[in-house]
Amino acid sequence: MTILDGKALSNKIKEEVKSEVQDLQMKKGITPGLAVVLVGADPASAAYVNMKSKACKQAGIYSIVHEMPETISQDKILEILAMMNKNPNIDGILVQLPLPKHVDTTAILEAIAPEKDVDGFHAYNTGRMTLGLESFVPATPYGVMQLLKEYDINPEGKNVCVVGASNIVGKPMSTLLLNANATVTTCHIYTKNLKEHTKNADIICVGVGKVNLITEDMVKEGAIVVDIGINRLENGKLVGDVDFENVSKKCSYISPVPGGVGPMTIAMLLVNTIKAAKLREERERKLND
């Protein structure tokens, strides 16, 4: 059994990003910029935003966090996003989810300029990703694909079971795997007999937020298991959606929690921000030619 070490790979990617930032600054006079919108005081969201800001700083990316109260109006958020869309120093904009119930999440995500949508949640980028065209890909599924690539795991022709169908993880994960020529089964809360689907899979990707959802008897011998779930137990310990201790005995590869997909998410966000900065430079050059 081999551990899919997302921490090691993310550190490698972050160093590459840092080098690219320095290159952009020296050759083009551009410092990539990322703006994060944080609404409310959810501790998990605040912790994620803090990690993203720290990673940006280490890579040399300019980062700003717009903290807003839970009670802020949707119109006010839209106003701030419009301002950031026009700001030439901001290459990437991301809104930390979930948003308060009185805010229409779709309306907010659609208000981000597609060329600054480094989270890849705008319908424009989702559509292009589905068609296999150049786009911004959501960071978590993007990170999973990079992790598989790092360990020479080619999904082509393999039976893959994606457990979870959220717009943030499950659906884009299924799309990327389908684009990589895998045979994909997407399971969700209405799926009957989940075990029947996971037992047949060469690769299982699970991200629903349920402790020990995937148990040893649901996994075939030699399967590859990618645990995207994050759950905090009462004792404070972080675990995924997979019964790691027992499932790992049957796997050929498995990602741990923490240290698997989590670090990759932040690394790929940095990659998307660099990409946005390069596309900005390209657009400006064409205007000046």
Image: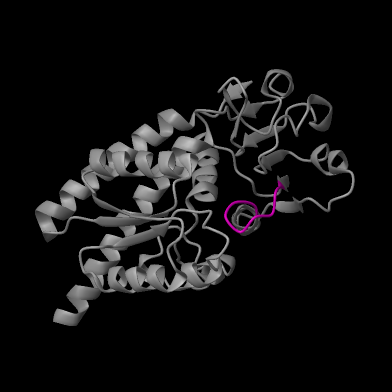
Relative height, residue 162 to residue 76 (above, below): above
| Horizontal and vertical percent position of residue 71 | 46, 60
| Horizontal and vertical percent position of residue 161 | 74, 45
Relative height, residue 37 to residue 245 (above, below): below
Q: Quadrant where the N terminus lies?
A: top right
- Give me the residue at 33% from left, 74% from top: 82
Out of 103 and 256, give the one closest to the viewer: 103
Magenta stretch bounds: 163-170
Relative height, residue 85 to residue 58 (above, below): below
Q: Is residue 60 magenta?
A: no
- Give me the residue at 84% from left, 43% from top: 194
- Give me the residue at 78% from left, 28% from top: 215
Residue 41 as seen in the image, left or right of residue 270: right
* Color style of the picture: one colour
- Give me the residue at 52% from left, 47% from top: 140
| Horizontal and vertical percent position of residue 61 | 24, 49
